Image: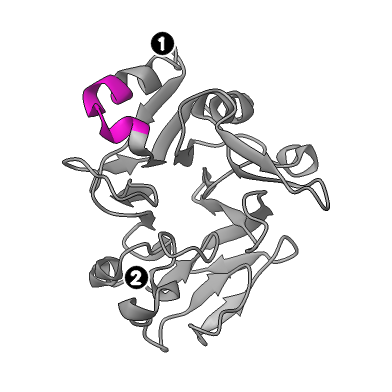
Amino acid sequence: MNIKILGTRANISTSAAMHTKHTGILIDDMIMFDVGERDFLLEKPRYIFITHLHPDHAFFQHPANGLVPASLPVYAPQSSNKAKMIKVVDENTMLDINGYRIIPVPVIHSLKVKSLGYIIENNFKRIFFSGDVAWIDKKYRDKFGKFDLVITEGSFYRKGGMIRRDKKFGKIFGHNGIPDLVKMFKPYTQHIVIIHLGKWFMKDVQKGEEKIRQLGTENFIVEAAYDGQVFEK
């Protein structure tokens, strides 16, 4: 699989060279996962999958940004009054698209919108794109198997990230820290790529890259991606 990282900036006002675009990846010039910038449509994807309906993952959620063409299939965890073209998917949905098997995985992130990660399988290769993550329940991780690559978020480096708890129902939400996410995904892969990078990273990109790299070992790669970077798996 050819995996192009379209954007690596979290929903923040600051940016840095090679880290200006919001979230999106493109698989084999065909299937896009998250479309945080309208310009990503210039890549001419044939299908779009959205992890959750926040504007930095779904540009059309911001009224001024316009819409995705109605002819382009868009899959997401829920419908939106800003995008009538959405086809709703959940953990009971498994899609076969041009030989690619797409498996949605429930992810805990927001109280206001539903969130999914996606397993993408093709030609005996498997990757996982998490979107933003507070946590993924063990019952879903138990079904992961092995991945050739995991792409996850880096809003916060500090352990624990920024996790909050709803006082009424006790549900957690927010963004976990990179060390916690690496620990979560390490049993399932030897290669983790971090995108959706937060303010902490933009202050000193070189230092941020090194901190992320140090979470890996000789046989276990953890690295920060940059806008436009391509991985082959």
Q: Is residue 202 magenta?
A: yes
Q: How many C-alpha atoms fall within 10 Å of the one at disc 1: few (<14), some, or many (≥20)?
A: few
Q: In the rendered view, tell whether residue 92 sits above or below residue 206.
A: below
Q: How many C-alpha atoms fall within 10 Å of the one at disc 2: few (<14), some, or many (≥20)?
A: some
Identify the secondary structure beneath mark 1: loop
Is residue 135 in sight in this rendering? Answer: no
Is residue 96 in sight in this rendering? Answer: yes
Where, quadrant-wise, is the C terminus in this rendering? top left
Q: In the rendered view, tell whether residue 87 sits above or below residue 194.
A: below
Mark 1 lies on residue: 218
Q: Which mark is residue 11?
A: none
Q: In the rendered view, tell whether residue 14 sits above or below residue 191.
A: below
Amino acid on which disc 2 is placed:
Pro
Q: Residue at x 38, y 74 (%)?
A: 46
Question: Is 70 or 58 nearer to us in this picture?
Answer: 58
Amino acid on which disc 1 is placed:
Glu
Helix, strand or loop for the magenta stretch, by majority: helix
| Horizontal and vertical percent position of residue 193 | 41, 35
Earlier sequence position, callout 1 versus callout 2: 2
Mark 2 lies on residue: 45
Report the label total: 2
| Horizontal and vertical percent position of residue 136 | 69, 42
Residue furthest front as drawn: 167
**What segment is highlighted magenta in the picture?**
200-209
